[in-house]
Amino acid sequence: MTDCQSALIVDDDARLADTSASALRQVGFDTRTARNGVQGYSNYFRDPTDWVITDIEMMELDGIEMLRCIRAINPTVKTIYRSAAARKNAPALSTESREFGAKILRKPFTWNHLIAQISGCRHQIINPDGKVLHNCTAMPSLSGANWAKKSRG
C-alpha cells in the first residue's frame, strides 16, 4: 500500500457506523464516523477524506444532500451510498452514479461487500468535459485479511 486511504462513515445507526469503521481499519484505512449529515459535512469540512460512505435517510440532512454540500468543496470525493431505501432514491442515485461514479450498497450487506466496493475502484472516472473525477489506483491490499471469519462474527 502506497498511501493510507481515509474514509468518513456517516450513519445514524451508531453500531453500524462503528463496525464499518472497524472493518475498514482492518484493511488499512484511517477512519472516522459521524451520526448524521450535518456532523458528516462538518467533519469533512474540517478534515477531508478520500471516501465518504453514507446512509441516505438520516434526520437533519440526508446523505445525498450532505454529499452535494461536500462536493461544493471537493467534487472528486469517492462515495458509497448504503441504504435499504435505494429504490426510493433511485433517480438521485442514478445521477450520483452517472455524474460522480458513486457506488450504491444496498442494506443488508456483508463486510465483504463493503470492502469489494472500495477495492473494486481501480481506474479513473472522467466526466464528459474530460475532468478526472476519481483516481482510485492507490487502494489498500486485501491480501492476508481473513474476511470470511470477521464478516460472520
Image: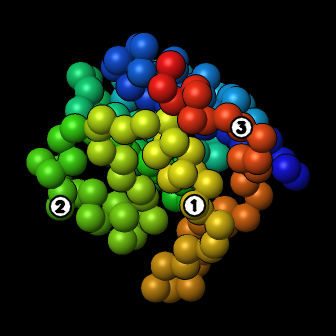
Which residue does the numbered mark 3 point to in the structure image?
145
Q: Nearer the viewer, mark 2 or mark 1?
A: 1
What amino acid is at disc 3?
Answer: Ala
In-front residue for pair 126/30? 30
On the image, the x and y values in percent for residue 61 come to 29, 30
Residue 138 seen in render: yes
Q: Which mark is residue 33?
A: none
Mark 3 secondary-structure assignment: loop
Lower position in the chain sequence, tag 3 or tag 2: 2
Write the residue at 17% across / 61% down: 91
Q: Are marks 3 and 2 in contact (CB under 8 Å)?
A: no
Q: Nearer the viewer, residue 70 or 7?
A: 7
Which tag, 2 or 1, sits closer to the chain's start? 2
Taking the image as drawn, is residue 44 in sight?
no
Q: Residue at coordinates 65% horizontally, 66% vertically from top-left?
A: 122
Tell whether label 1 touches label 3 (CB within 8 Å). Answer: no
Seen in the picture, residue 143 relative to 96 is either above or below; the reply is: above
Identify the residue under disc 2.
91
Apparent side of residue 24 relative to residue 9 in the rendered image (left or right): right
Q: Amino acid at mark 2?
A: Pro
Q: Point out the residue furthest to the right here.
A: 2
* Residue type for callout 1: Gly
Please give the residue where the numbered disc 1 appears in the rendered image.
120
